[in-house]
Image (tube, helix red, strand yellow):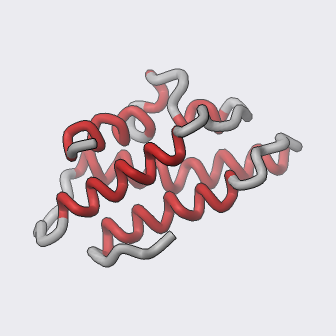
Amino acid sequence: MDYQAAYSFLTAQGKDYQITPESFLSRLQQGKPPVPGQVTNILVALKMVFGDLQGAESIDREVMTSIYLVAYESRRAFMAGVRAGVLWPPLLDEDIDRIGLGVKSILTGIWHEQ
């Protein structure tokens, strides 16, 4: 996955989640688990963006919006599902933590092992 593919994927999963019915956020907000491999692809895309932004002085607003939404809104949707009694896959909570660490890595410039 190159930077452009990572950017496009994260945009579909984050900023454009409302127009992408099978996006990570759309599925979580509907009380559905992620599509198999979706979390792994998000983590790979975050690592690609991290690598591409090493040494950069700024982060593109579109990229920032997308990664913020993937990290923050996925946690909110997960917790709303917990309160509503959704039976999430057993590792989804940890996966969402890993996504948050990936975003933190991009913002701090230091990769946080997941």
Position in image of residue 65 (x %, y %): 34, 49
**Front residue of this view, candidates 77 and 49:** 49
Q: Is residue 106 left or right of residue 52?
A: right
Image height of 37 relative to 76, above or below: above
User: Looking at the rendering, which quadrant does residue 112 occupy?
Assistant: bottom left
**Front residue of this view, candidates 62 and 53:** 53
Q: Residue at x 29, y 43 (%)?
A: 6
Q: Is residue 101 left or right of residue 86?
A: left
Position in image of residue 35 (x %, y %): 60, 32
Position in image of residue 73 (x %, y %): 55, 49
Q: Is residue 76 left or right of residue 24?
A: right
Assign the N terminus to one quadrant of the image. Answer: top left
Q: Is residue 47 left or right of residue 99?
A: left
Q: Residue at x 69, y 36 (%)?
A: 33
Image height of 36 relative to 2, above or below: above
Position in image of residue 102 (x %, y %): 42, 63
Q: Residue at x 41, y 69 (%)?
A: 104
Q: Residue at x 50, y 58 (%)?
A: 99
Disc tally is 0
Image height of 88 relative to 52, above or below: above
